[in-house]
Amino acid sequence: MALLSIVLPAYNEEQNIANTVSVLTGILEESKIDYELVFISDGSRDRTFAEIRKASEQNPRIKGAEFSRNFGKEAGIFAGLELTSGDAVIVMDCDLQHPPQMIPKMWEMWQNGVEVVEGIKTNRGKESLAHKLSAGLFYKIMSKLIKMDMSASSDFKLLDRKVVDVLLALPERNTFFRALSFWAGFRTEPVYYEVQERQFGESKWSFWSLMRYAITNATSFSTLPLQMVTVMGLIAILFSVILAVQTLVRFLLGNSVEGFTTVILLILIIGGFLMLSLGIIGHYIARIYEEVKGRPKYIISRVTDNVTGDVIGTWRKTR
């Protein structure tokens, strides 16, 4: 019988663990789907891992791990993928904003030969205006940079085991799960869903965290910002040529520009472009530096009793 693994990254979600387990196990058992739930506590400061361990003791199909510190959602997703053993894997939020009612449909699509089932949002649910604006800006930036529509995309998706193996084989440390699953290809079909309300707690994403997330993922997946440096250089040259022609014409007409206004303006514009270009190049150099060091994506400090393997550093299955 085929096994379905569900990866659930969690950060300070102690209030949601028990409810999530109850809802998911109820749906999966009712649908007669053989399953395992894999929780990853991303360096949570509350009792998230204690709740995961408690659930694991009550149900051997539930297992989990805790990071030594907060490594981010991307690391949590890839750690969860590493711990899975299912023939298909679903990644979803621990707070159940990704509707678990869609799981049987996604499973059925996989049984019919679909290798990637892409969850697409039809709306974002109830969010503050500031959060909607920041999320909208994030998705516009990402869509332009990686040349795929991120506005309706989410981490809620089902992957066939072969797709999971491809993603885990990638050597890069700075990963962007949504874009990489798109980049990998394979037969993909969408499912549409509405974002559900959280039962407990609140979103951990702020405007600035979304912007940092956007910059990090954009530079790890696209070279477009580097190409922008060339564009800015061309704009500066064009502006300088226009200004030089205007100055020469006025000089020949006996009405030359007085003072240092033009010089100061040129210095400010070109200097601004140069500093911005250096910042972009510097960010890419920093990303290269991080990759060259070869440090693991995450470090696991504890696992539930039903997980075997080395917990010091990146966890690896016992073959």
Image (cartoon, helix red, strand yellow):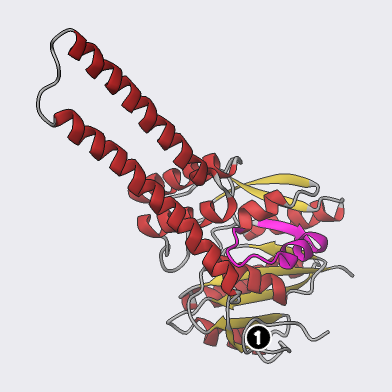
Q: x, y percentage for residue 60?
A: 72, 85
Say what secondary structure mark 1 lies in. Answer: helix
Task: Quadrant for the N terminus, please.
Answer: bottom right
- Picture quadrant where residue 232 is located: top left
- Identify the residue shown where x is 79% and y is 86%: 318
The reply, left or right, for residue 45 in relation to residue 319 is: left
Q: Give the residues drawn in magenta, as a range.
A: 157-176
Residue at image mark 1: 56
Q: x, y percentage for residue 163?
A: 78, 59
Asked if residue 217 is positioned above or below residue 307 in the image, the reply reads above
Question: Is residue 2 within the magenta segment?
Answer: no
Asked if residue 312 is positioned above or below residue 182 in the image, the reply reads below
Q: x, y percentage for residue 214?
A: 47, 53
- Identify the residue shown where x is 59% and y is 47%: 153
Question: Is residue 172 within the magenta segment?
Answer: yes
The reply, left or right, for residue 165 in relation to residue 90 is: right
Task: Quadrant for the C terminus, please.
Answer: bottom right
- Picture quadrant where residue 27 is located: bottom right
Q: Nearer the viewer, residue 248 or 129?
A: 248
Q: Nearer the viewer, residue 1 or 58?
A: 1
Q: Residues within 10 Å of mark 1 (few under 14, many from 20)?
A: many
- Identify the residue shown where x is 47% and y is 43%: 141
